[in-house]
């Protein structure tokens, strides 16, 4: 199979090799993982590394003995690999921790503490996961105003709609890189340019985008960006990237003995070292899909090929949903798959989403129903929180055969 993106042919995506690398897929016995937006599977590389860490180096960092030195080394290596994944040139800009939400909260608290009278407005979107809305709305007060960048009927955020919200009072814009519910992509570089045009900063939630395509924080020119390891084929952990000067200026909580320098000033307490090692190994797995060159080049090439492969999955799934008569929220045109990742939100006529997900589970598909932790998006789409919609979210290890099996299920169930 040769994949084509527009007129540009690319080399064949090594789907068999990819699937072979994931122990959960090898042991799946026909079960189909279509709930990847909630959490992805991890490759052998990562599993082995978590195990190795726990057996060989399960001690606290900062000691003078070999095992402890090795923990410090493994953290430094992971930080540097993640910097390559993000296209950052300075590993000190990468902060390691527990998950995305706590990082968003930490940055929002620091921004809140430093909000001046002159810069008192924060822009959030109605398309984001609540983690990137509630954390900023918590700053709302007599002095701090929240403004809403609203999604259009095409299921996308348009930078043209952001611009009129921006003034000299805007301190920060917080937006997603890609909707975790509908898969719509956002023009992050455009949002950054608009925010910077009025002297504001851009905070990007890349949790959902990160497993689907290359990130280049320099080209995007954002100020902060957050990811979750467990969504990018790693164990449970999170990381925050911030422009060095931006992180340096944040008034964060830190214990007395912690240097007031990135990344340490953002890394509160002990995080899960074995999971950081696992994430590090996941970077090697991804780089292995990327051909030749240094780690950054290989990671960028790998994520590019994932992006292209997944466009094929998107096209096929859109056809299937259309054949099933589904109401698709977001980008539904198969010719516009470049505007989305393979995450689909839909409803099937008057069928309750929970019933669809239950029937899918019986047929061997892990999919999700409900509000997708996005109450503002549900309101925007006119969906009740206790009804919501069905979400099917694919990843680079899914196949068109699995989509065809899903089509068969939909025909039987809703046909
Ligand atoms: C887009 C998005 N942002 C943020 C989060 C929260 O991430 P975490 O669980 O790492 O706090 C999620 C989790 O589903 C998400 O999908």
Image: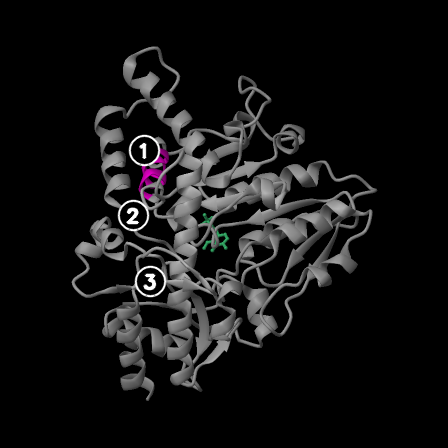
Which quadrant of the view contains residue 254?
top right
Q: Give the percent coordinates (x, y) of residue 148.
A: 70, 60
Q: Residues within 10 Å of mark 1 (few under 14, many from 20)?
A: many
Q: Which percent across, then down, holds residue 16?
A: 23, 56
The residue lying furthest to the bottom in this view is 415
Cα separation, mark 3 vs mark 1, equals 38 Å
Q: Is residue 313 above or below residue 354?
A: above
Q: Secondary structure at mark 1?
A: helix
Instruction: Estimate the x, y position of residue 240 in percent, counting from the top left.
Output: 52, 39
Horizontal and vertical percent for residue 404? 28, 75
Label 3: which residue? 2
Q: Label the magenta part by its dominant secondary structure.
A: helix
If you read the primary sequence from the N terminus, does the residue marked by circle 2 or circle 1 appear first? 2
What's the colour scheme? one colour
> Image point 39% across, 53% down: which residue?
305
Query: Few, some or many C-alpha atoms within 10 Å of disc 2 (few <14, some 14-19, many ≥20)?
Result: many
Residue 97 seen: no
Q: Secondary structure at mark 3?
A: loop
Q: CA distance from mark 2 to mark 1?
A: 14 Å
User: Which residues lie in the magenta part?
Assistant: 276-285
Badges 3 and 1: C-beta atoms under 8 Å apart? no
Contact between marks 2 and 1 (CB within 8 A): the answer is: no
Residue 148: in magenta span: no
Q: Earlier in the sequence, mark 3 or mark 2?
A: 3
Q: Residues within 10 Å of mark 3 (few under 14, many from 20)?
A: few
For the point 23% across and 48% down, the residue is 21
Disc nearest the viewer among 3 and 2: 3
At 50% from the left and 30% from the top, the residue drawn is 268
Observer-side mark, 3 or 1, equals 3
């Amino acid at each position: 199979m040769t994949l084509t993106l527009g007129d540009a042919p690319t080399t064949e995506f090594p789907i068999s090799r990819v699937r072979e690398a994931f122990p959960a897929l090898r042991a799946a016995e026909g079960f189909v993982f279509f709930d990847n937006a909630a959490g992805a599977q991890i490759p052998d590389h990562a599993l082995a590394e978590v195990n190795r860490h726990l057996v060989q180096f399960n001690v606290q960092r900062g000691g003078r003995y070999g095992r402890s030195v090795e923990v410090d080394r493994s953290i430094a290596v992971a930080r540097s690999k993640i910097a390559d994944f993000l296209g950052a040139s300075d590993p000190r800009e990468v902060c390691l921790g527990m998950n995305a939400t706590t990082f968003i909260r930490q940055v929002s608290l620091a921004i809140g503490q430093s909000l001046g009278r002159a810069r008192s407005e924060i822009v959030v979107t109605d398309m984001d996961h609540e983690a990137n809305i509630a954390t900023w709305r918590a700053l709302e007060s007599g002095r701090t105003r929240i403004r809403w960048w609203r999604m259009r009927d095409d299921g996308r955020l348009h930078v043209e709609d952001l611009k009129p919200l921006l003034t000299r009072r805007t301190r920060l814009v917080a937006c997603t890189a890609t909707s975790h519910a509908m898969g719509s992509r956002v023009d992050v570089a455009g949002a950054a340019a608009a925010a910077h045009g009025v002297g504001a900063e851009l905070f990007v939630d890349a949790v959902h985008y990160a497993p689907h395509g290359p990130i280049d924080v320099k080209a995007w020119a954002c100020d902060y960006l957050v990811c979750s390891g467990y969504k990018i084929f790693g164990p449970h952990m999170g990381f925050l990237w911030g422009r060095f000067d931006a992180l340096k200026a944040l008034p964060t909580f830190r214990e007395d003995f912690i240097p007031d320098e990135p990344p340490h000033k953002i890394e509160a307490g002990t995080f899960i070292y074995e999971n950081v090692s696992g994430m590090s190994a996941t970077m090697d797995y991804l780089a292995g899909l990327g051909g030749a060159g240094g780690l950054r080049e290989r990671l960028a090439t790998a994520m590019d090929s994932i992006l292209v492969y997944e466009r094929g999955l998107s096209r096929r799934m859109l056809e299937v949903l259309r054949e099933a008569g589904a109401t698709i929220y977001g980008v539904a045109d198969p010719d516009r798959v470049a505007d989305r990742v393979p995450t689909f939100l839909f409803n099937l006529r008057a069928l309750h989403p929970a019933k669809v997900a239950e029937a899918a589970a019986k047929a061997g598909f892990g999919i999700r129903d409900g509000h997708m932790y996005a109450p503002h998006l549900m309101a925007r789409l006119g969906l009740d929180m206790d009804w919501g919609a069905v979400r099917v979210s694919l990843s680079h290890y899914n196949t068109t055969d699995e989509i065809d099996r899903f089509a068969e299920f939909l025909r039987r169930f809703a046909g």
